[in-house]
Amino acid sequence: MRADAENETARGTAGVFEPTAIQKFGVRDVPEWVRVGDHEAYVGYIADEGEGSSLGLAYLRFRAGVRFDFLWAYDEVAVVTRGSLTVRVGGEVRTAGVGESLYMPAGVRGTFDIREDVEAFCVHYPTDGRAGREWQGPERLPAEEEIRPVSIDEVWN
């Protein structure tokens, strides 16, 4: 099998997520990016409930200076691939650098406090759709209306 054909099989057909196949992804495989509020904070979903996944899979790209509160309805792990990811929870500060991870449990409020440009790959359970339907806690942050699609050119240069 040719190397490019092998890669095509490993990723799925034409970059489409296939929940029953072993796949390889990179940041360039993100089909659509969303922007969080007026921040230079972007999330690119690879897969979620709509694609038949039981996990949410996404990349994030935040610019230095981004700061906003979050409250997830799912458990999430962010693996830093570039820069560093800093989160404040109460009086504590947690920073993960390249190759390190942050675990952010459902229902714990935190604040992103981005000190340098960061890129991370995030995995969360359950999917955002399922978590939104089943969540019984306070209003999730950021609010749904603060999230909107953007052009890939706006995400990173």
Image (cartoon, rainbow, N blue to C red):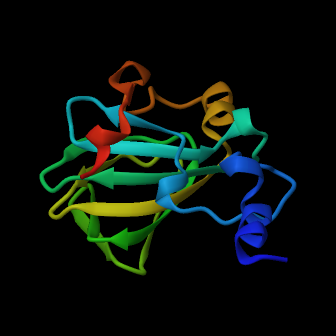
Position of residue 47 in the picture relative to residue 157 (left or right): right
Count how many numbered circles sit on residues in the image.
0
Q: Residue at x 15, y 62 (%)?
A: 115
Quadrant assignment, res 82: bottom left
Q: Residue at x 48, y 62 (%)?
A: 121
Question: Where 125 falls versus 102 (above or below)?
Answer: above
Question: Where 143 falls versus 157 (above or below)?
Answer: above
Position of residue 70 in the picture relative to residue 83 (left or right): right
User: From the image, which quarter does the N terminus lie in?
Assistant: bottom right
Residue placed most toward the observer, 120 or 6: 6
Q: Residue at x 48, y 42 (%)?
A: 72
Q: Position of residue 27 (x, y in %)?
A: 47, 58
Q: Position of residue 18 (x, y in %)?
A: 79, 49
- The answer, for residue 17, to whether it is visible in the render is no
Position of residue 93 in the picture relative to residue 126 (left or right): left
Residue closest to the far front: 2
Residue placed most toward the observer, 8 or 120: 8
Q: Position of residue 125 (x, y in %)?
A: 65, 50
Residue placed most toward the observer, 32 or 71: 32
Quadrant assignment, res 31: top right
Question: Where 138 falls versus 20 (above or below)?
Answer: above
Residue placed most toward the observer, 156 or 79: 156
- The answer, for residue 76, to whether it is visible in the render is yes
Q: Position of residue 130 (x, y in %)?
A: 69, 33
Q: Residue at x 66, y 50 (%)?
A: 15
Residue closest to the far top: 145
